[in-house]
Each structure stands twice: as structure tokens, then as C-alpha cells.
Image: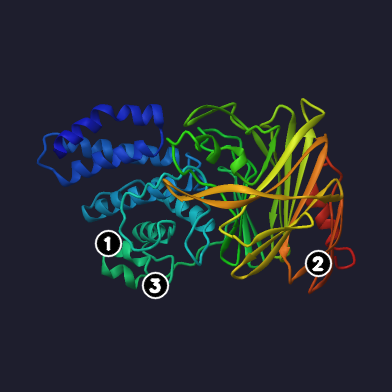
Amino acid sequence: YLWYHGLRIEKNIDFALKALGNNHAISEAAGLFTLGLLFPFFQESGRWLRKGQEYLTREGLRQIFEDGSYIQNSFNYQRMVVQLYSWCLRLAQLNNISFSPELIDRLEKCVLFLHALQEKASGFLPNYGANDGALPFPLTGCDYGDCRPQLNALWCIVKGKRLYEPGMHDEELLWFVGEEAAQADLESMPAETAFHDGGYYVLQGKESWGLTRCTTFRHRPGHADMLHLDLWWKGQNILVDAGSYSYNDPATRGYFNSTLAHNTVAINGNSQMKRWQRFTWLDWTKAKLLCFESNPEFSCFEGEHYGYPEAVHRRCIICRDQLWMIVDDLLPAGGRRANIRAHWLLGSYPNAWEESGDLGIQTENGALRMSFWNQGDRARAVLEKGWRSLHYGQKEEVPCAVVETAADLPYRLITLLYPEEEIEVKGVHDTRVEVEGKTGTRVIQLNSTGEKGILKTINQEAGVNGT
């Protein structure tokens, strides 16, 4: 049966290599490599082994970018690839087979990338991109969303060191490497924040961090999610990604991968790209990074995308201490007026409520508040029903905060998120935000709508009167 399986893969792998060019190609290459190595008595084994190693090397270097991000725009598919290479590289080590240094270096960058985007306390990654439950080797008792087992195993295979302190996540490492892995030294990992090839940017705050995406798609996108913000506070995922749920449910198929299921802005009720089939979008979004900086004082991101014919969506995200500020500018492109809908999908927080247009969120670690400002005046958010799927085929109802208006362009919406006990908002204008915290009053000066260079303005303000 395995021999027939090998014949089948070899005969049809061109479809995975040329038509798909994604994890299917790596999976089938891993199959050829495994059969060729472990069953040397097949007449075809030598050829399967050579082809498997060739395709694993070629596809790894093509599909994993120089910064470690992955071609499929999906963290779960990237984790699947991590497991496949862990299997193949460990088999190669045990049989004195070497893979190219270039591939090993690319796999190291792959682990570094995912580690930088991980909530260290839980091991979870943002629920970003297609997530259909793929996990080829279920070798651990950890939660499905915990990615520490997979990253730990591959890092130890290629570097001989561990990524994490001892815990249940070691189980997969022991299966792949053996008991000696438990004694491996602990690796000190760099705190990378910018991954320009893939367009992923990490913003660090006090007890919080966020991830946003800004890139021009070069390979088939899965979700219409440009400038989406995923936000974590005290280990909890506060602003979340909806996930995938199901590829086949006609009632929800149009929701989970649409712009309306992500923390960004929709224009006239449309997604940023045109849907053609279940797995295909047309008119792939183009985007441009305007600035990014992350330092101990503040983090700032500014980027824009061109997915709507009516308007350019420019987003600036600023994090200083406990304050998160998101500035959304809608600039005229093909129209002068548009229906604008900003939406924020929350985690599993039944204690979320509206209060004079603001939004209160009670978490197990404290209360957060979101306030919204429309052209310098208060904007009102309403809570609607949203959906999130952490496991394929399962969905849960979660609250979604929505600010919607019909407005002339250009238009600016400012969203503030902060701990209630730490910060008080004193005043918000189109170009100025003033807040008071335990360290005193802080003023953040913004440029006028349509002007670039918010980061430059922040740097200038940082030296004025201690603000």
C-alpha cells in the first residue's frame, strides 16, 4: 500500500509544485523523502529519496521568505510546514543525510518569525489567516493553539537548543529528538519587530503588544485583512481575528475571510478585494508602509492600502505605555463621499458594554475602555454580534464594536484603547490627543488629515516640555 502511495505522489506531484506551490508541495515532497528513506527495498526508493530532498530544499527556499514569513499568509499553515521539516530533518540526521545550509538558515528564520509573533505565556499566535486545523503530528497534550511544541522541536533539531523553560510543550521535543533534548541549553531569542518581506509589524506596549499587516500581496491571499490589528493585553487576546470556521458552510463562507470579520475599515460594505471562488480573490490588495519604529518610549506604525476604488485607507497605530491609539484616515480616490464602517472584534468577553458611545471591556485582569472620535467629536460605537473560530468547524459568538457613518472625504476616525484605572482622556481633537496617567499629562500631536509623517511629529513632540 505504501509503495502504491509513493507511485501516486510521484506521478501527480507536479500539480502541487506548479499549480498550488504551497504546503501541499512540501507535504508531498516529505512523503517521497520518507518512503525513499525508510523503505530502501522498493525499486523506486533511491529516486524518491533524491526527488523528495530536492523538492524539500527548493520549496522551502521559495515558500519561506528571507525574513521567515510564509507564502500562504497563514500562521497555522506555517506551523504545519514547521512540523513537516522537523520530521524530515530529524530523519535525515539519524541517517547521515545533510540538507543545504541555505535551507537550514531559512528554517531558523521561520522559527524566529513565529516566535516573535507569539504570546509567550500561552504559546498562542494570532489567529491569522486560514486555519483549517492542520496539525500532522498531534504529539502533545498542549492546547491546539499552543505553538511552543512545534517551534521548540524544530529549533532543537537545527540548533541543538531549547526555546522555552521546561513544561508540557516538551513532549513533542522528546518524541522527535529523545530524552537528551531535555538537557539542552536554553536559547536567548532576539526581539524582532519588523518583517518587511511579509509585511508584518509588531508594536510593543506596557503589558501589551499588537500585530498589524501592511504589504502588497505577491501570492494568493486567503483573507481580505489589510491593516488588521490584533491586540494582546496581559496575556489576553483583546482584539481578535475571526479565523476560518469552515470552507464549506454556505451560511458563513462569506464572513470569516472578509474585511468585515477583521479589525480594519470597510468602505460601502465591501471587502478590500473581489471574491471569485472559495479560495480565490481578484484584484489583490496593494499597500505601502509609510513608517515604523519601535523603541522603549513608544511604537508607531503608519501604512496605507489601495483596495477600494473610492478611497485610500491610511492607518496609524501609536502605542505609548498603556495607551493604544489608532488613527484611520480615509482619503478620496475615486469618490468624495462614502459609507465608512470601522469594526473591532473582541475576544470571549460577555462583560462588554456601551456607555455614552464608549465601550467597556471587563477582563479577568482588569477593565479596558475604548473611545471613538469622529473628526474631533465623539463618535458612537454600537455592539453587534460577531463570530470567532479557534478550531476548524467550531465557532463562538463574540461582541463586535462598530462605528459606522456616511461622510465626506477626507475623513478621520481616532480610536483609543486603555486601562480605565491607568489613564483618563482629557481631550481629543483632529490633530491633538491629551491624556492623563500616573506619570502625568501626555500630549500626542498628529498631522492634519492626508499629511504623512505622524512619526516625525511624535519625535518632535517628545522633546517639548517632557510630553
Left or right of 156 in this view: 401: right
Residue 116 at least partly seen: yes
- At horizontal 48% and vertical 64% (from top left) the residue drawn is 122
The residue sitting at the left extreme is 41
Q: CA distance from mark 2 to mark 1?
A: 51 Å
Question: Where residue 175 is drawn, which disc sits there?
Answer: 1
Residue 320 at least partly seen: no
148 relative to 382, above or below: below
**What is the quadrant of the C terminus in the image?**
bottom right
Depth-wise, is mark 3 or mark 2 nearer the camera? Answer: 2
Kindly identify the amino acid type of the residue bearing the numbered disc 3.
Pro
x, y percentage for residue 257? 54, 39
Q: Nearer the viewer, residue 283 or 386?
A: 386
- At horizontal 52% and vertical 47% (from top left) the residue drawn is 128
x, y percentage for residue 291? 72, 47
Which secondary structure, mark 1? Answer: helix
Which secondary structure, mark 3? Answer: loop
Residue at which label 3 appears: 166
Q: Nearer the viewer, residue 405 or 56?
A: 405
Question: Which of pointers 2 and 1 lies earlier in the amino acid sequence?
Answer: 1
Kindly identify the amino acid type of the residue bearing the numbered disc 2.
Glu
Question: Which of pointers 3 and 2 lies earlier in the amino acid sequence?
Answer: 3
Q: CA distance from mark 3 to mark 1?
A: 15 Å
Question: Where residue 42 is drawn, which disc sits there?
Answer: none
Question: Where residue 424 is drawn, which disc sits there?
Answer: 2
Q: Mark 2 and 1 residues: CB-CB less than 8 Å, in contact?
A: no
66 relative to 441, above or below: above
x, y percentage for residue 289? 68, 42
Which secondary structure, mark 2? Answer: strand
Left or right of 145 in this view: 217: right
Which quadrant holds residue 1?
A: top left
462 relative to 75, above or below: below
